[in-house]
Image (cartoon, grey):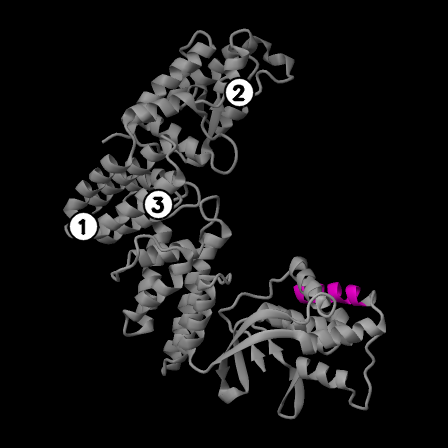
Amino acid sequence: MFRVPPYQRGYEWEKKHWRDLWTDVNRIGEQVDKHYLGNIILLEQESGSVYEIVDGQQRMVTISILMMAIRDSSHFESSDDEQLDDIRMRDILETHKGGSPEPKIILDDEGANEAFRKLWREDIEEANGKIRNAYDYYSTEIDSLSERQVEGLVNNVCDFLKVVETVATDTSLAYTIFQSQNERGKEVSPQILAKARIHGAAEDVDDLEKSREITRRWNHIYNLLEKNLGGPRFQRGLRVRRPMTQILTNSDVPTPRQIDKSELYRNFEKVLDNYDDVYDFVMWFQEQVDIYLEISSSSYDVDGHNVPDDAIRHLQYLNSASTHSEVLSLAIYNNIDRDVLLKEDFKLASILAMRMRLSSMSSADTRDAIYGTARRVKNTEDQNEIRQTLRNAIKEYTPSDGEMEEYLKANNLNIQGPWNFRTRLALVSIEEERRGPWKMEIENLHIEHIAPRNTYGSKPEYHSWREKLDDERFEEQKDMLGNLTLLLNEDHASVDETSFANKKRRYRESDVKIAEEVASYDEWTSDHIEQRTEDLAKELIERWSL
């Protein structure tokens, strides 16, 4: 019997994968003599009566579904005289435990396993989900075949579809084999492999309650990251992997400055092996995840319950500037135990990141600077010296004021799409220079174009704007810093955009200082946009300087 362990993902193959397997099986005999499905890695359990599927679940389950679709085809006739095809079919699909036949594969996901069992029992109409969808796909394909072709299909699967089966009796050996497959280019999720490693280590713990607590906590860690991280900063594939690499980087064990996907599991084991007790490792990791979720954000939504209130804005700026910022903020948090230093150092870290973003440094250069600075912070023994470490990094990694100004004067800001919160925060940083820390919720602020973006569109009511704005220049200026301000959402919703004079009335009454200032202009021209862009660029440079 083969069992899918709880650390594995569910059955996830879809039509593309079913079609690829179908094509591969049908190529046998016509184009190739046999087809290799790759390596199946099994961990022997219960003295060889049960095998845990370390790698190969998707392939093994899908082949079983294909065989059940063949079994149920009108061209596959079952009989009582033990025909070869009947024997081979049962050998693939069933095992005998306690004298009664059972499905040969047990899935961990309860719903998928129930659907699989219903197909196995030939209760086809009762099955659902992806398991049923895969069955329906293969049933449709098989219906178009002749009896001879179905017979050939059975032969192809049973005799010429090959795998390399690797069976390990030791837990750590099975995971080491799995990792070696990954390093040779096999697409293996390292966070799933780490999860498998923790579950395997928990099984070796003699204390049953402690063993259960280890797996429960690790599953909880995994679910916390999946549930709480998202938005443009944490795409689905990064919600567990990136925090894991950044936490390992900040451990007491020597690791590379930046851990890439192929090295994640190796370094995970390195840090785990530094602990005498896997329980202690899981507890440490849980603590680091809790901190990580305090200092991280999907856009600008920093939780920060254990971070000083006046430091949270610095974390928002830092996170908005780099998708890798948590590795630096985690290094700062772990090495400082005084709130006043935490605030000062988060501020310096935000200056480092914002200067790079506002000068449009490449994401690779920004990432390298963030990781390099995090490593320096981690290695700074005296927490009072971390300020100087961050100052040195700002001087070394960030561009000059002149480079920042040239970029801000010549380029549009990101207004549309999921990353527009970066521009919103840049404008908030200007506003805060006028009024002190911003107490309103950033979600209540809207990026406002002073001259409407579609001024030169088809709307006739914008004719008064066209009289003052140069057509060709405005196309380049409409998303530039000088044509942008902030408004509260309710004010933005009520703005009359037909003329600058009408907009000024709303701006004059606004609680936002930079919007109120725009009301002091008599008119709004391309020259005004250019001059205001230059003025605000200098303000941003001043705001994000040491």
- Residue 354 placement (x, y as % from top left): 33, 35
Tag 3: Cα neighbours inside 10 Å, few (<14), some, or many (≥20)?
many
Quadrant, the C terminus? top left
Q: Say how many tags the image has.
A: 3
The residue that appears at 45% across and 54% down in the rendered structure is: 239
Q: Which residue has dot 1 on it?
A: 380
Q: Tag 3's secondary structure? A: loop
Rendered location of residue 299, percent (x, y):
43, 42
Is 136 contained in the magenta span?
yes
Residue drawn at the location 29% of the way across and 34% of the way down: 398
The kind of secondary structure element at disc 2 is loop
**Residue 199 vertical placement versus 333 (above, below):** below
Residue for badge 2: 495
- Amino acid on which disc 3 is placed: Ser
Q: Residues within 10 Å of mark 2 (few under 14, many from 20)?
A: some
Gap between marks 1 and 2 measured at Cα:
52 Å
Kindly report the distance in space between the C-alpha atoms of the residues bearing marks 1 and 3: 18 Å
Q: Nearer the viewer, mark 1 or mark 2?
A: 1
Q: Quadrant of residue 171?
A: bottom left
Q: Which of marks 2 and 1 precedes in the sequence? A: 1
The reply to whether residue 307 is visible in this rendering is no
The residue carrying mark 3 is: 325
Report the Cα–Cα distance between label 3 and label 2. 37 Å
Closest to the observer, 338 or 246: 246
Identify the magenta region. Answer: 130-142
Vertical placement of residue 124 versus 460, above or below: below
The mark lying in front, picked from 3 and 2, is: 3
Up the image or down, 46 lies above or below 261; here it is below
* Amino acid beneath label 2: Val
Predominant SS along the magenta part: helix
